[in-house]
Amino acid sequence: MGKEQINALQERGVRVTPQRAHIWRVLVESGEHFTAEEVWKRVRDTLPGLELSTVYRSLEALQAVGLVADSRLPEGPRVFEARTALHPHLVCESCGEISHPEPEIGWRLLEALSTGSGGFEVRELHVVAKGVCPGCAGGRE
Amino acid sequence: MGKEQINALQERGVRVTPQRAHIWRVLVESGEHFTAEEVWKRVRDTLPGLELSTVYRSLEALQAVGLVADSRLPEGPRVFEARTALHPHLVCESCGEISHPEPEIGWRLLEALSTGSGGFEVRELHVVAKGVCPGCAGGRE
DNA sequence: GTCGCTGCAAAGTATTTGCATAGCC
DNA sequence: GGCTATGCAAATACTTTGCAGCGAC
């Protein structure tokens, strides 16, 4: 089952170890973002001896080849996710829920930023918006 | 000279102490962003006994009333700045320089995000772009 | 077989907290 | 004068690092 994921690692020239394969699988299959510690807890189910430091080092390796991206949200530790497209984060100040808008919007943001940034060539874009999600706005305070 | 700054604090109902007044002054007069430690070093010139923990607590108080905003850049500790407008950060991967595009662009980003985020009400927008600044792009590698 | 990855342990950096006193309002 | 902010000290949270042996290629 995890065959395609392993291929993804090999293609990028990343040495494939069980640790990296599992870490990568967790990120890809969930499609979510996790802290290093969350990844660690999940992968430990199948690799009991796994060290948190290894998780950090593996995530760094995956980042180096562009498979993983990290974000620093307004609070809490860094979160990591499989790098798919640009990924704005919407953090609800009321319920704390973190959601992603349609990815297409990332490109519009990129475009807006590129045209107005005076020659700065944007390679990677991190957007975090704080606000109120539809659910919380509905249940008025 | 620092009269207007002190007023800004009073108007917001922040108890005015020398520590807070100086911290606030450093941020306003420089117009730059600093880590808590950088603020600390600067203010210590005039307030030798100042503790780093006090800087954190003061910055938090100023944040609570909307005078200060913080950003978490891709690397390093949090940076704080006087809250003026939306403030995208452009981080050059080559020289490490952090620049700000014209602030007007922030509003365009906000607009783009608001229209495509499915009812999420954006209150605060943090944008960090990694890329290559004009200077480094000129001196081709 | 080689070189890089991992486990283990420890250190390092960033940030927060408890408590008694000082100082703003 | 009351109540909060500060100094001081310690704790906590997150992340990185050194080293020796193991495992992927």
Image (cartoon, coloured by chain):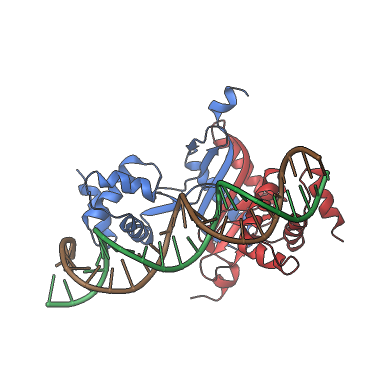
Chain colours: A blue, B red, C green, D brown
Above or below residue B136? Residue A59 is above
Q: Nearer the viewer, residue C25 or B101?
A: C25
How many numbered circles are shown?
0
Which residue is drawn at the image coordinates 29% and 55% (left, top)? A51
> Is residue A91 in view from this perspective?
yes
Say left or right for A130 vs A68. Answer: right
Which residue is drawn at the image coordinates 38% and 58% (left, top)? A63
Q: Nearer the viewer, residue A70 or C18?
A: C18
Which residue is drawn at the image coordinates 82% and 53% (left, top)? B6
Q: Nearer the viewer, residue B71 or A119?
A: B71
Which residue is drawn at the image coordinates 68% and 47% (left, top)? B61
Residue A141 lies, in percent from the top left, at 63, 24
Say left or right for D24 vs B8. Answer: left
Say left or right for B138 vs B26. Answer: left
> Is residue A7 in view from this perspective?
no
Residue B78 lies, in percent from the top left, at 57, 56
In the rendered image, the residue lying farthest to the top is A139
Residue A93 lies, in percent from the top left, at 57, 36
Query: Where's the N terminus of chain B, which quadrant?
Result: bottom right
Residue A45 lies, in percent from the top left, at 24, 43
Image quadrant assignment for residue A29: top left
